Image (tube, rainbow, N blue to C red):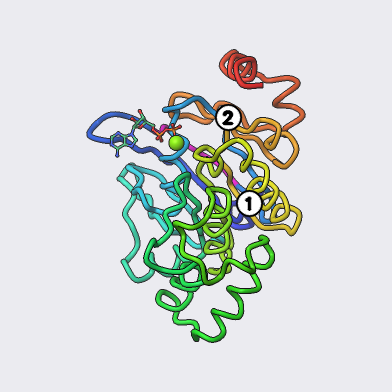
Amino acid sequence: MAEIDAAISVRGVCKDFDGFEVLRDIDLDLAPGTTTCILGPSGSGKSTFLRCLNWLEEPSAGSIRIDGTLIGRSGEGKAARPMARRELARARTSIAMVFQHFALWPHLTVLGNVIEAPVHVVGRPRRQAEEEGRAILARVGLAEKADAYPHTLSGGQKQRVAISRALAMKPKVILFDEPTSALDPEMVGEVLGVIRELAKEGLTMVVVTHEMGFARDVADTIVFMDGGRIREVATPTAFFTNPQSDRAQRFIRRHG
Ligand code: ADP
Ligand code: MG
């Protein structure tokens, strides 16, 4: 795939924290409309990588293109430089992120959470944002919760609100960082079900997950990380039936 055709294109991304190397030479192209699941042991750099993708974390080197637009600049051997703040804010609106711990605004209703960024970040008219927000909530099965406050919801419902909030920005890409890890087991299915539907609709998504069954069923591509590097990029079938590295084999044996 040409860099320019990818929804996200990553080249040579490295990240260190005070000299401690967390990501090393990451190259990856994500095709539009595909779901990529990132697997790997705890501490392998998965969250840091997701955070670099939307520049929540600034890479120490390398470049990232979103839909062909360079959001980080890499010079010859120099550390990546972020784009101007305003440009960056605009680029970032095309990537939404869903976190393990929901990160909802406690003082806003469900609908308030969903329309916050569309109204205040991109300046969409409130009436339009509300209409779109209610439609999204209906899509994730939360139509009747629009006026409820987050503390009254179950974990699964909170995460579906967080997904609705991401969708409300009409992003080109949604990043999920272990979206079901904080949930009671009985609520995992309802959240994975919503993500599964979004995959069918052709959104471009990157999902860090420990849910192997989900990754196997839903991913177009599996990315396996270990020790801050991408060790394998494969289809689910290839990855789960014939992992190439010892590390991946061990990981699958432990989690599979
Ligand atoms: P994963 O999501 O795969 O569990 P992380 O990306 O959270 O891995 O972390 C990778 C490594 O980077 C870990 O060793 C972690 O301790 C370290 N790390 C992550 N964030 C920071 C930070 N802000 N400062 C220092 N070290 C960090
Ligand atoms: Mg993590």
Question: Does the magenta segment cover residue 122?
Answer: no
The stretch in magenta equals 23-29
Identify the residue at image location x=51%, y=59%. 95
Left/right of residue 109 with respect to residue 203 in the rendered view: left
In the figure, residue 141 lies in which quadrant? bottom right
Q: Amino acid at mark 2?
A: Phe
Q: Which mark is residue 224?
A: 2
Q: Label 2 vs label 1: CA separation? A: 22 Å
The mark that comes first in sequence, 2 or 1, is 1
In which quadrant of this rendering is ligand 1 seen?
top left
* Residue at the front extreme, as displayed: 152
Q: Residue at x 58, y 43 (%)?
A: 207
Label 1's element? loop
Judged by depth in the image, the label closer to the viewer, 2 or 1, is 2
- Point out residue 138 in the picture as x, y percentages from the top left corner: 67, 68
Q: Up-down: is 36 above or below 244?
A: below
Q: Name the main secondary structure of what is drawn in magenta.
A: strand
- Residue drawn at (46%, 59%), measured in percent from left and top? 150
Find residue 2 and name its label: 1
Side of 201 where 222 appears, left or right: left
Q: Is residue 178 above or below residue 157?
A: above
Foreground pick, 88 / 11:
88
Is 114 or 256 nearer to us in this picture? 114
Magenta-span inclusion, residue 28 = yes
Mark 1 Cα within 10 Å, few/some/many (few <14, many 20+)?
Answer: few
Q: Residue furthest left?
A: 18
